[in-house]
Each structure stands twice: as C-alpha cells, then as structure tokens.
Amino acid sequence: MKKKLSVLFIVLLLCNNSYAKDLTGTIIYCENWRNKAFSFRKNPEAWKYTTFEFITSLSVDVISIRKFKLEEYRYDYKVELQKIIMESYKIRYSIDRKKLTLNDDKRCKIIKNENFKPKEIMKKNLDKVIAKQKQLNKI
C-alpha cells in the first residue's frame, strides 16, 4: 500500500509541472501608454514600461518605470498553464501566455534581438517620459 501511494505521489508531482517551461535567456518587453479613452497619452506619469529578463529557471530581473523613477528587482517566477506569475509582498506581475499581456493591460512582446539591453532601453524610456513631463509643465 505504501508503495502504491508513493508511486501515485510521484506521478502527481510530475504531472503538476508538465506545462512548466524554463524561460532562461528570454526577454519580454511590455508597454502601455494609453487606455481605452486615450487619456493616458497626454499624461506621462501614466506611461508604463516594464522589462522581464529571465535569468534562471526560477528567477527574473524586472525593470520598470514608476513615478518618474527606474525600479529594478529580482523575483522568483512560476510558469502556470496560462500565466507566468512573479510576486513579492508588495507587487504581483502576471503575464498571459496566450495574449502576451501584463496584468491584462500592458501589451508585451518577446525580444529576440541579442543586442537588446533592457536597462539601456528603460533608461531611454525614462528620459522620454521625463522630457515629456517637462514639456507639459507650466512653471
């Protein structure tokens, strides 16, 4: 009986990860600068850019622009059948594997260019956001 239970446990354990994929080396770039009413387009603070660089089969480096600052964090991730989940005590990211959207609002794309440097691209995006806000400032 113990033998049957242990075999069943191992089979269930293996079946649980049948859809998991090692994303090591993959870079995903996401952006959202508009909403359905197109009101975000005029508000640089609402422009959202995020990159995900999958470092190992368990960890991902995330660079995002929030409130005119560049934020960099390393998260653990798990690949589910429909989503890739990264979370910490204060933030949760969810990438839809079929639609390639981040948290159901940012459009994402997989970067296949080996010369793509996430940190450099994000710094350029931050400069663009800050420049646009300075242009809109009246004082």
Image: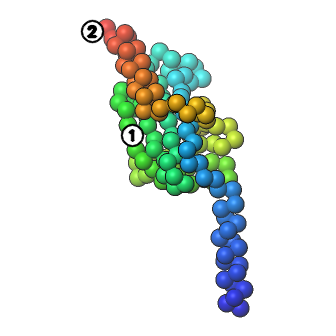
Q: Is 126 drawn above or below residue 25 in the view shown?
A: above
Residue 32 x %, y %:
54, 27
Q: Mark 1: give few (<14), some (14-19) or many (20+) Cα within 10 Å.
A: some
Q: Quadrant of the N terminus?
A: bottom right
Closest to the observer: 26 or 37? Answer: 26
- Residue type at mark 2: give it: Ile
How many marks the image carries: the answer is 2
- The residue sitting at the left extreme is 139
Can residue 87 be seen by looking at this rendering?
Answer: no
User: Which comes sooner in the sequence, label 2 or label 1?
Assistant: 1
Of tags 2 and 1, the one toward the viewer is: 1
Image coords of residue 37 (percent x, y): 57, 20
Q: Where is mark 2, residue-wise?
A: 139
Q: Disc 2 on helix, strand or loop? A: loop
Going by the picture, which residue comes out furthest to the front?
A: 114
Q: Residue at x 37, y 15 (%)?
A: 131
> What percent of the width, then of the height, locates residue 138?
31, 8
**What residue lies at 52% left-to-right and 30% top-to-bottom?**
115
Quarter-of-image position of residue 7: bottom right
Q: Are marks 2 and 1 in contact (CB under 8 Å)?
A: no
Circle 2 Cα neighbour tier, 10 Å, few/some/many (<14 / 14–19 / ≥20):
few
Residue 93 point in image, percent of width and height: 51, 44
- Give amino acid for label 1: Glu
Q: Give the labeled residue for mark 1.
A: 72
Q: Give the number of the disc on residue 27.
A: none
